[in-house]
Amino acid sequence: MKRLYALLLLVVLLPCTLFAQEKDRDWWKHAVFYEIYPRSFADSNNDGLGDLNGITAHLDYLKRLGVDAIWITPCFPSPQVDFGYDVSDYESIDPAYGTLADFDRLVAEARKRNIRVVLDFVLNHTSDRHAWFQDSRSSRTSAKRDWFVWRDGAAPGQPPNNWGSVFGGSAWQLDPATGQYYLHQFYPEQPDLNWRYPEVEDAMMEVARFWFKRGVAGFRLDAVDRIYEDPDLRDNPVKVDPDGSETLVETYTTNLPELHNVLRHLRTVADEYGAVLVGETWTSSVEELQRYYNSLQMPMNFVFTMVNRPSAPEFRKQIHDAERGLGWPVYLFSNHDITRHYDRYGDRAYNDQIAKALAALYLTLRGTPILYYGEEIGMTNNDPARVQDVKDPIGRRFWPHNKGRDGERTPMQWTAGPNGGFSQTAPWLPVPDSARTHNVAAEEKDERSILRFYRHLLELRHTNEQLREGNYVALNENDANVLAYLRTYKGKAVLVAINMSAVPRKIALDLRQHSFGAKAKTLLATESQPGSIHLSEISLAPFGVYIGEVK
Ligand code: NOJ
């Protein structure tokens, strides 16, 4: 009899446990991610640079905002030529940011608040100071020679082929010590690893394990589309633009099919720890993006960031494309490589309203959003005014046509005080004047601030089942100014209406075909709205937002 009970218990409990585990594995689907540029987030020791203890000290702020996972851009030992994307030791912390003990404390404190920590995995290249490269460049017969991509020049003084670096110039650097060229798709100080060499794959999987064992919940995979190149070194095709200028089409240096085998391998390792893989997946179409879903849970949809103006039809199309894809959408507007969206979309008259409208858009869509630190307070880009102030090498190289990426990496604005309350010493990048109005302390107190709006939105997103789980249903699809949609779940729906224009608008909605009535209960709006509205007349201020539950 006892045995029968035990068996029954097993039959009942096992599926429940498996289901719970499965659900837990999908934690990232309903998580709100927040990207932190550690150098610029919070400076705990007043040396002008942000650090890990600074992040730990602000976990309560992040919790209150509604963040579930932080992605920290590289904080490993590095000569900082590319501000951490040139890693000289994958298994430690750069002393400028703290110690491994600080990191462990950050993970532990984050865990107490139910916030997961995701790190940046720089797979494509190391720093030229990494011991692997030092060994590799020491002689042609070094045991690590094939860990990097070495080739003879095509002719004396000529690189092996026409491949170009993302940061300008040839992708090949002659190393006089051994007379051969090495490949670098980014700065010469960032030699490309040779993923065709099995020992590289093994070593990097061990790096992943090292961090997973320390409690890291996943990785954002840097430059993931570039880890393989054509083994025959075929020249990239040259495209001549109508103005006569020439660009290289990166046929033989990006998106080679082999890379998916490595990603699948990494995914099996990540799965052992229930971890998530987020891809820096720059693609020109959603179709191209779909391929990454074979191995990654969260390939970022950069196509969405390319809209670059508040436009109902264009966003409708982007959402439609992401929705018809096979994978769970991953949305973002800003990061440390692109101009902050406050400036990209801002019209200077309604910047704050536009910031709220965009937040309302991507934080109410089906999918996972990735915020960039400071967007929740409306931080602007602060591009350097003089070339001698530029820190990012591409800014120095291409000045003034390209001022580099310093502008989107300035210190977090905590208060209206000196240096935005980031540090008591001059920070590594200057804080813009807008910090006087756009800072955490001031916005905490102002119930109409961008910060308070983000908080309300995220609270709604976490607590409302329709926003968490619901299907996306487009409404009024021919409206050129107002983007409206439903999120429907279990017979209930939330309506989102966003005026993407600088003119007040009125829309009328008839939801009978979707089996809903003519009224909505207001959940959140940018302007004051009655507790309940009639759907035949929804009034929206310029860039105004209305979110309500329809009955
Ligand atoms: C993409 C990173 O986001 C960027 O900041 C970096 O410069 C390159 N990859 C090279 O690692």
Image: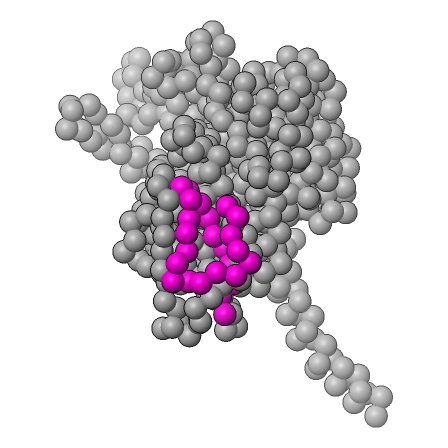
Quarter of the image where one finds residue 438: top right
Residue 194: percent from the left, percent from the top?
A: 46, 34
Of 249 and 72, nearer the camera is 72
Asked if one can make out residue 199 in the rendered structure from this viewpoint, the answer is: no
The picture places residue 522, in percent across and down from the top left corner, at: 53, 58
Q: Is residue 37 above or below residue 310?
A: above
Q: Is residue 455 magenta?
A: no
Answer with the quarter of the image where residue 172 lies.
top left
Q: Quadrant of the N terminus?
A: bottom right
Compared across the picture, whether 497 is left or right of 270 comes to left
**On the image, which quarter does residue 236 sit in?**
top left
Across and down, in percent, residue 508 comes to 36, 60
Q: In the rendered image of this protein, does residue 285 appear above or below residue 1?
A: above
Residue most extreme to the top: 388
Q: Identify the residue shown where x is 43% and y is 33%.
A: 350
In this picture the colour scheme is one colour
Instruction: Name the foreground residue: 496 vs 458.
Output: 496
Question: Residue at 46% across / 19% down in the picture?
Answer: 383
- Judge whether residue 537 is colored magenta: yes
Towards the viewer: 172 or 244? 244
Q: Residue at x 27, y 56 (%)?
A: 478
Residue 492 in picture, x, y percent from top left: 51, 70
Residue furthest right in the image: 2
> Which range of residues does the magenta coloring cover?
527-551
Q: Which residue is painted at 64% across and 12% down in the image? A: 426
User: Horizontally, is 285 left or right of 417 in the view?
Assistant: left
> Does residue 409 appear in this view?
yes
> How many marks are shown on the rendered structure?
0
